Image (tube, rainbow, N blue to C red):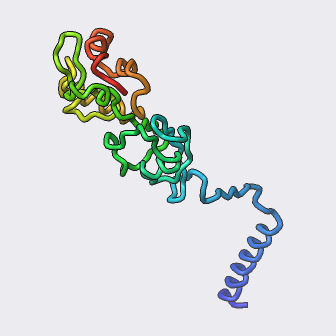
């Protein structure tokens, strides 16, 4: 036989034995098939979000990645009659493990129309509405005693990173706000 034919036979025999080896000795590794709706970072992934406050059905909701806040409110059976949706961004995209608190309309505004500018403080000065630490802008937060631009920024960053404040006392978790500063602002803030 010529060398070229021998070479072809050797290669053919090698291929044949390789195929037989795979057939006779199957791979022991298991193949795991992940359903498309499992959380895998794909388009059809789901996240879990906690919604509380002024909604008819508060709790933890499973929603698709990319869901917007207005869709979550619908899933929570809609907002209550006392909800103040003007304080939140209904178009915001939800994140996994996020907590959303739907605020209520500030009740003190409707009690006494003679103090339409707000509530009168113990010093007799007229005060504006309470400042929501969960929804107020940086400019609104700076109206609080002792809160400047850098502290307002820390408050906003804290609520964005932690899903908001659950009580006004939680503001003490913000770096730079201790008991003394909290006592100065506690009567002026709400969640």
In screen coordinates, is 82 left or right of 18? left
Tell me residue 143's x, y (percent): 19, 25
Residue 138, quarter of the rendered image: top left
Q: What residue is drawn where x is 43% and y is 26%?
A: 166
Query: Is 180 rendered above or below residue 12?
Result: above
Query: Is 104 rendered above or below residue 35?
Result: above
Residue 152, quarter of the rendered image: top left
Q: What residue is drawn where x is 80% and y is 69%?
A: 23
Tally the numbered discs: 0
Tell me residue 154's x, y (percent): 28, 28
* Nearest the eye: 176 or 85: 85
In screen coordinates, is 111 left or right of 164? left
Q: Is residue 150 visible?
A: no
The quadrant of the rendering that contains the N terminus is: bottom right
Tell me residue 14's x, y (percent): 72, 75
Query: Is 189 rendered above or below residue 163?
Result: above
Q: In the orientation shown, which residue stands out farthest toward the bottom?
A: 1
The quadrant of the rendering that contains the C terminus is: top left
Residue 102, quarter of the rendered image: top left
Q: In the orientation shown, which residue stands out farthest toward the left?
A: 125
In screen coordinates, is 31 left or right of 84? right
Tell me residue 189's x, y (percent): 30, 22
In screen coordinates, is 85 left or right of 152? right
Q: Is residue 182 visible?
A: yes
Query: Is 144 rendered above or below residue 122?
Result: below
Q: What residue is drawn where x is 28% and y is 27%?
A: 131
């Amino acid at each position: 036989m010529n060398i070229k034919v021998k070479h072809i036979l050797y290669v053919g025999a090698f291929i044949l034995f390789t195929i037989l080896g795979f057939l006779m000795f199957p791979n022991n590794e298991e193949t795991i098939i992940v359903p498309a709706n499992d959380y895998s970072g794909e388009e059809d992934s789901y996240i879990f979000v906690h919604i509380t406050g002024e909604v008819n059905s508060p709790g933890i909701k499973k929603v698709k990645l990319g869901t917007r806040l207005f869709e979550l409110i619908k899933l929570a059976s809609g907002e209550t009659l006392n909800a103040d949706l003007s304080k939140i961004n209904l178009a915001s995209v939800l994140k996994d493990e996020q907590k959303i608190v739907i605020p209520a309309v500030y009740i003190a505004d409707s009690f006494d129309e003679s103090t339409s500018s707000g509530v009168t403080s113990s010093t007799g000065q007229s005060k504006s509405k309470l400042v929501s630490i969960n929804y107020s802008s940086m400019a609104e937060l700076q109206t609080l005693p002792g809160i400047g631009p850098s502290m307002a920024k820390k408050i906003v960053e804290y609520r964005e990173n932690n899903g908001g404040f659950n009580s006004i006392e939680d503001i003490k978790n913000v770096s730079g706000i201790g008991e003394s500063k909290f006592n100065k602002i506690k009567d002026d803030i709400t969640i």
